[in-house]
Image (cartoon, rainbow, N blue to C red):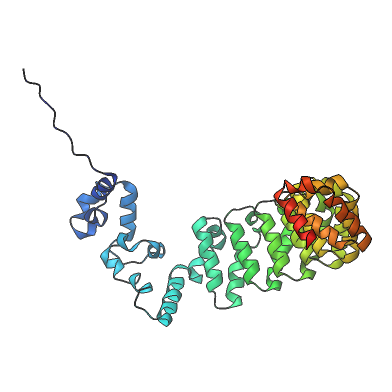
């Protein structure tokens, strides 16, 4: 008997299979017999097409869809006019303004700033609205909706960017409510947080020293533990560059009292290198002398990324006799330093 060979099914490539499921007629059922076609589509596609409709109503989010996904009625309407390749620069600015009015209108955002700030896309919308605001009064009105939520925003992966944008764009006096709410919480915990540390740094960069004075005062007792923290060390380095001279002196004394502990850690070395650059001269010399009393620490630090910078700045801060002694100590270990990339960099700087 002759064996029957079953017919092979046609095998479609992934791109062909996708095209067969989402061809132009099935994606836009309003073009022909859409009732029967739409019922065969997965429900997410049906929901999208249902919201797009025939293009009679423009949805805020529809301007972000690719041109190939838009129905012709919608593509030919207001969305298509937002940015064509042939428009002039002035027309492009007008189109951008229309886009912001469409998506980021203050009426549309009113009462929704905090809820949008906690979402990835919504956070970008709020930030764009703050940038596009035509006056400081509009920005302050938008920022007022995050009042009472600053502590939550400092720990949110999306809202923290909105808080930072408010600090960056508002007048320093208008950002005072952010400082006040931070002081109601545990500032040390915020400084150690992955996102909260950014808020404190932005405040130090953009607000007046008098505004952040109490904030810095609450962090000075924790300066040593913060200096050893993966995120807190950035806060300490920033404050060493921004706070008052008296506060820098107190921070430098606290660091000098725990020199051996800080020199053995990567983040501690980074803080020491910043302190040796920013604190007043007397405290800088005290830090350098404390370091010189630990020869074994100097050699270990000289072979690390941040430590070799701290050692070089410490040597430069010493008096002539102390500098000569420190240089002699380093050159006596030239063989050991030569095996390290950072040790070689230090020796090269000492030769210059």
Determine which quarter of the picture holds residue 210: bottom right
Q: Quadrant of residue 74?
A: bottom left
Camera-side residue of 266 and 210: 266
* Residue 254 seen in the current view: no
**Which residue lies most toward the top here?**
1
Q: How many marks?
A: 0
Instruction: Please name the residue shown 72% across and 58% down the image.
Output: 182
Which percent across, then down, holds residue 289?
Answer: 91, 55
Depth order, front residue of 326/195: 326
State which quarter of the image contains the C terminus: bottom right
Q: Position of residue 119 (x, y in %)?
A: 52, 55
Outermost right residue? 321
For image coordinates 71% across by 65% down, the residue present is: 203
The answer to whether 40 is drawn above or below residue 321 in the figure is above
Along the line of sight, the residue nearer the viewer: 351 or 247: 351
Residue ranking furthest to the left: 1
* Residue ID at (88%, 47%): 294
| Position of 135 relative to 257 (above/below) | below
Rendering coords of residue 320 (x, y %): 92, 63
Q: Quadrant of the N terminus?
A: top left
Q: Looking at the picture, how far across and down is residue 206, in whole percent?
A: 70, 69
Residue 24 appears left or right of 204: left
Q: Note whether 44 is above or below 124 in the view shown.
A: above
- Residue 321, visible in the rendered structure: yes
In the image: residue 230, left or right of residue 281:
left
């Amino acid at each position: 008997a002759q064996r029957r060979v079953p017919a092979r099914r046609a095998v479609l490539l992934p791109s062909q299979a996708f095209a067969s499921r989402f061809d132009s007629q099935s994606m836009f059922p309003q073009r022909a017999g859409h009732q029967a076609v739409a019922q065969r589509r997965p429900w997410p596609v049906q929901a999208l097409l249902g919201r797009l409709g025939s293009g009679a109503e423009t949805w805020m989010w529809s301007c972000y869809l690719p041109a190939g996904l838009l129905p012709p009625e919608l593509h030919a309407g207001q969305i298509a006019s937002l940015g064509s390749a042939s428009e002039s620069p002035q027309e492009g600015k007008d189109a951008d303004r229309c886009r912001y009015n469409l998506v980021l209108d203050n009426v549309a955002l009113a009462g929704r700033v905090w809820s949008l700030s906690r979402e990835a896309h919504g956070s970008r919308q709020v930030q764009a609205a703050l940038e596009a605001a035509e006056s400081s009064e509009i920005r302050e009105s938008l920022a007022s909706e995050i009042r009472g939520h600053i502590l939550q925003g400092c720990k949110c992966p999306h809202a923290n960017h909105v808080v930072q944008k408010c600090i960056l764009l508002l007048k320093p006096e208008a950002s005072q409510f952010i400082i006040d709410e931070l002081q109601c919480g545990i500032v040390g915990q915020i400084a150690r947080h992955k996102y909260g540390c950014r808020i404190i740094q932005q405040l130090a960069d953009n607000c007046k020293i008098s505004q952040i004075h109490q904030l810095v005062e609450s962090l000075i007792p924790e300066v040593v533990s913060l200096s050893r923290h993966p995120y807190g060390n950035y806060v300490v380095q920033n404050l060493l560059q921004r706070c008052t001279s008296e506060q820098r002196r107190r921070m430098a004394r606290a660091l000098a009292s725990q020199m051996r502990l800080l020199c053995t850690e990567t983040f501690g070395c980074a803080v020491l290198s910043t302190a040796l650059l920013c604190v007043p001269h007397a405290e800088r010399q005290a830090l350098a002398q404390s370091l010189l009393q630990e020869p074994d620490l100097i050699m270990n630090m000289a072979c690390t990324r941040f430590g070799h910078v701290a050692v070089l700045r410490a040597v430069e801060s010493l008096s002539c006799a102390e500098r000569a002694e420190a240089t002699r100590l380093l050159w006596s270990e030239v063989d050991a330093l030569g095996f390290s990339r950072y040790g070689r960099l230090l020796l090269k700087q000492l030769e210059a």
